[in-house]
Amino acid sequence: MRAARAVPFVLALVVAAARPVGHAQQAPAAPSFDTDVRPILDGVCTRCHNERKANAGLNLTTLLDPATFASHRNTWEDILDQVKHGDMPPPDEDPLSVSERAAMVSFIEAAFARADRELKPDPGHVPALPDARGRAPLRDPSHVRLFHGSGRPPGRRSGEKRRVPDRP
Ligand code: HEC
């Protein structure tokens, strides 16, 4: 009797508990190191890449801090490469889920892009000095966009108009 009356209550609890999860899936939070990178590295990768068992000479227990993106960039590039292409964990191991892989990859790529933006000089700040006769230079450096996100110079597109500054 008591148990029977408890059933609707328990059902209501289950429904209430399930609902916020559904919402969370519709609008996933932005990936973060703490939720999307460290747990995979620590829980999956360090099983084979640690001090005692450093497969491929890699000890990933030293990379559990996002500051290592800058100090160990090359290793992180390797990690990104391996995870992005599904090469790690190795094929005979449980693979990462599609969403785990996507979140980890997107966090690392965003961190690299941010670091690159901060490191590369902004050519827009180079002053355009007039030449000896006092004319404006033909190519104002502030129009030259050297880097654009990907780190590759974009190059002039064929249809693009050449921008020649007005003479003073
Ligand atoms: C079951 C053990 C195992 C697990 C788990 C594992 N690895 Fe590996 N890893 C290896 C072995 C063995 C190699 C060397 C041989 C190879 O490249 O396949 C390797 C190589 C690598 C390399 C170097 C590849 C190269 O040649 O440049 C990287 C980077 C790497 N692993 C990252 C990871 C990451 C990141 C994870 C977690 C997502 C991970 N590994 C999980 C065993 C493992």
Image (tube, grey):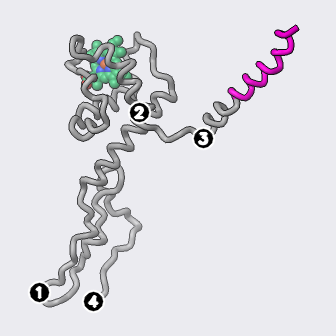
Q: Is residue 143 left or right of residue 107?
A: left
Quarter-of-image position of residue 167: bottom left
Tell me the mark number nearer the camera, choosing from 1 and 3: 3
Q: Would residue 97 be seen by someone viewing this image from the given angle? A: yes
| Residue at mark 1: C-beta within 8 A of ligand 1 | no
Q: Is residue 16 left or right of residue 74?
A: right
Q: Which residues are magenta?
A: 1-18
Reading the image, the residue beneath label 3 is 27
Q: Are marks 4 and 3 in contact (CB under 8 Å)?
A: no
Up-down relation of residue 124 to residue 149 (above or below): below
Marked residue nearer the N-terminal end (4 or 1)? 1
Q: What kind of residue is marked 1?
A: Ala
Q: Would residue 88 be seen by someone viewing this image from the given angle? A: no
- Please name whichever residue, 59 or 95, is drawn nearer the observer in this view of the structure: 59
Reading the image, the residue beneath label 2 is 34
* Residue 26, image x, y percentages: 63, 38
| Residue at mark 3: C-beta within 8 A of ligand 1 | no
Marked residue nearer the N-terminal end (2 or 1)? 2
Reading the image, the residue beneath label 1 is 132
The C terminus - image quarter: bottom left
Marked residue nearer the N-terminal end (1 or 3)? 3
Disc 1 to disc 3, how far (Cα)?
Answer: 59 Å
Q: What kind of residue is marked 3?
A: Ala
Reading the image, the residue beneath label 4 is 167
Q: Is residue 47 magenta?
A: no
Q: Are marks 1 and 3 in contact (CB under 8 Å)?
A: no
Quick one: SS at disc 4?
Answer: loop
Marked residue nearer the N-terminal end (3 or 2)? 3
Tell me the crowding category of disc 2: few under 14, some 14 to 19, or many 20 or more residues within 10 angstroms, Cα based: few
